[in-house]
Image (cartoon, rainbow, N blue to C red):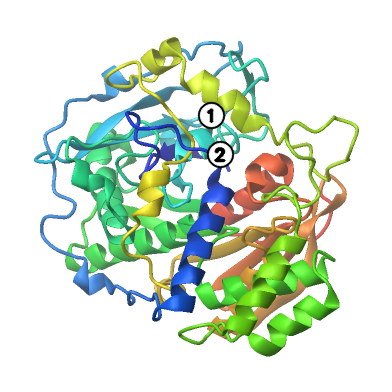
Amino acid sequence: MKVSLILSLSLLSCLVSIQRCHGGEGDVLLKFLEARQTKQLFTTNVNEGQVGAEDRVNSALGSIIPQKGSKEDDKISALPGQPSGVNFDQYSGYVTVDADAGRALFYYFTESTQDPSNKPLVLWLNGGPGCSSFGNGGMAELGPFRVNNDGKTLWLNEFAWNNESPAGVGFSYSNRSSDYVTGDKRTSEDSYTFLINWMERFPEYKNREFYIAGESYAGHYVPQLAQLILSHKKIDPHIVLNLQGIATGNAFIDIETQNRGSYDFYWSHAIVSDEVHEGIVLNCNFSASSLSETCYEYKTQADFSRGNIYYYDMYARLCGSPQNTSLPISGYDPCTRDYVDPYLNTDEVQEALHVRGIPQEWSSCNSPIHASWQDSPDTVLPIFQELMQSGIRVWIYSGDTDYTVSVTTSRYAIDKIKTPIKKSWYPWYFQGEVGGYAVEYQNLTFVTVRGSGHFVPGYQPGRAFTMFSSFINGTLPPDQYLK
């Protein structure tokens, strides 16, 4: 099934007027988790508490706000360096989510290549926290274009997902500096308000089948936004957001299983020694409010023994390494960000995207926003369980060569839910080869993508597209090779 797709809602990406931030989405999440572990060691439990949806629903959320933009103004005639043969409409611009603060979120939207009037709508969110969904997801993973290594021209992504959140991220902004100190709650609220007002600009998508997908720290964003939408639905059954399902990939959803699963993954993939792993197993209680000094010493040894390998894909070469030093399982270029950054910092590109205040300095992630993140519950598993009982489709997927948020952490998190199995673990196929493995639980589906790192649609685009199509169609990934 072909989909119409909001590729990127730039939730708390890089503030365009501040210092360029370095490191990608996985680097940012690793630093975020390490900071939380340090707080857990020397202070008390960092769990800010699970924010209930009833505490977040109020009459102001989702209100219609006067807008400067319009659908006609947001239409992109063509992006600089765009290849020939483009057969879909694309749009980008801003939606104001707080008129008093002057807070507006940047979006990029592409319609389906065929009959967009009858296709579902998908919102894609990247994580961080504080990383751009447009630059990371839209331009490097699942969008219609990829940037060539010249940083100036584009090529068509054969497996783009249109085939067959916070202000300060990417090009999003606020006129109030305090808005750049934010967190989970503000992100979900702004995302909801964005969607309600975006629908006014694109009314043909009101009540269309709607899905939310994302990766990494979007393991928080996606279920929290879904919970908020469904909570508003209870109050107002006529809400225009017809949410049908969510999918999160290599997603941080539970701090205990993130820590425990990461070190088990290191050991099972020959990154740490038996002795170090045993020391962690015997001395680290990741469910406790604090960690012992002995545990911390073994963790330090484990982190050091990882060496200099690519965060996002443990088998890929490093950017800058000679081409023939290693043979990655996927064809992903680890230097992709080095091509996207100069492209999005080109005046002509920003003008085509309708960026306000050109020129602006775009960057993949916003370190100050990440460093000052306010609220982040230790676990969102209760939200997943709530969504599983709501009747919407709930999928969790993992690329199996990512060690930032490994497949092991996802499996451990799902084990905590303790939902019965409907279809046992099986291999699924893409072009005659195993694309990964899947298991169907009661109200939950878990899928792995073989040979993929953190950015699944970027590392294994064909396999990822097969998985995504199954998700949208409400079917399991194919258990045999289909010609």
In the image, what residue occupies the spot 28% across and 24% down? Answer: 71
- Is 334 located above or below residue 76 in the figure? below
Separation of residues labelled 1 and 2 (CA atoms): 7 Å
Name the residue type under label 2.
Lys
Seen at 70% across and 50% down, the residue is 453
Please tell me the numbered disc located at residue 2. Answer: 2
Q: Nearer the viewer, residue 130 or 211?
A: 130
Residue indicated by mark 1: 114
161 shown above or below 434? above
Q: Residues within 10 Å of mark 1 (few under 14, many from 20)?
A: some
Measured as percent of width and height from the top left, residue 264 is found at: 73, 74
Instruction: Specify the label residue 1 is tagged with.
Output: none
Is label 2 in a helix, a strand or a loop?
A: loop
Q: Earlier in the sequence, mark 1 or mark 2?
A: 2
Image point 72% across, 69% down: which residue?
301
Label 1–label 2 contact, CB within 8 A: yes
Q: Work out which quarter of the rendered image holds the N terminus and state it.
A: top right
Residue type highlighted by circle 1 = Gln
Q: Does any portion of residue 5 appear in the rendered image? A: no
Foreground residue among 320 and 443: 320
User: Residue 312, can we see it?
Assistant: yes
Q: Quadrant of residue 75?
A: top left
Give the quadrant of the C terminus.
Answer: top right
